[in-house]
Amino acid sequence: MLQLSEIFYSIQGEGTWAGTPAVFIRLSGCNLACDFCDTDYSTKFFAGCDEIIAMVREKGGDCPMVVLTGGEPLAQRETLELIEALRRDGRRVHIESNGTIFTELPDDVWLCVSPKERVDARMARRANEAKLIVDRRVPVEHLQLFAEKPTILLQPEGNKPSNIAIALEYAKTHPQRFRLSLQTHKFIGAP
């Protein structure tokens, strides 16, 4: 049984895959307590993998992309079982993680690591995408973890104008490596 907050169909609003339709499975719970977190990841219901697959089909039909998010989706032991069930159902699995919990993942699973307080270096190396949250500053202390990544996304916390200005200026100063990543779903009113 997995603890869930919600399952919904929308578009990926952030990062490399922004604009792509996706079913989001928000698992509840997190192993961090970030003061800027704007996500309600409290437990709303429990479900097994078969029930979750049925909900994904009901909400998103044949949409191939499924995003596991949270909280921290890798904090629950049963998440690996869910990943396998989604892959068997023909879904392309993406995970949005804070990168603190080392987990062996299949090669075809897309991993976005967005470090907050700390990150496991193995997860940083495994990441397909690195996203740094800009909250009054660029968290440069995490850059060394992603030294092998050619592109790092800078995402202004809360789309606040001051954070956007900081991220934009940093990206413009370092155009070979950094890209601005706004939460486009919030601009268009999508969940």
Image (tube, rainbow, N blue to C red):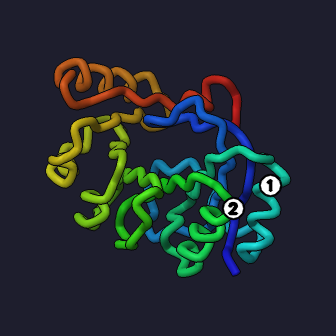
Q: Which residue is mark 1?
A: 57
Find numbered disc 1 in the image and state the secondary structure of the residue it sits on: helix
Q: Which residue is mark 2?
A: 89
- Tell me where residue 118 appears, x and y as whole percent: 29, 62
Residue that appears at 35% across and 72% down:
102
Residue that appears at 58% across and 38% down:
12
In this picture, is 22 found above or below 161? Answer: below
Return the residue found at the far right: 58
Q: Which amino acid, by three-letter code, is at mark 1?
A: Arg
- Tell me where residue 108 appears, x and y as whole percent: 45, 56
Q: Earlier in the sequence, mark 2 or mark 1?
A: 1
Find numbered disc 2 in the image and state the secondary structure of the residue it sits on: loop
Front position among marks 2 and 1: 2
- Tell me where residue 101 appears, x and y as whole percent: 38, 71
| The C terminus lies in quadrant | top right
- Quarter of the image where one finds residue 188: top right
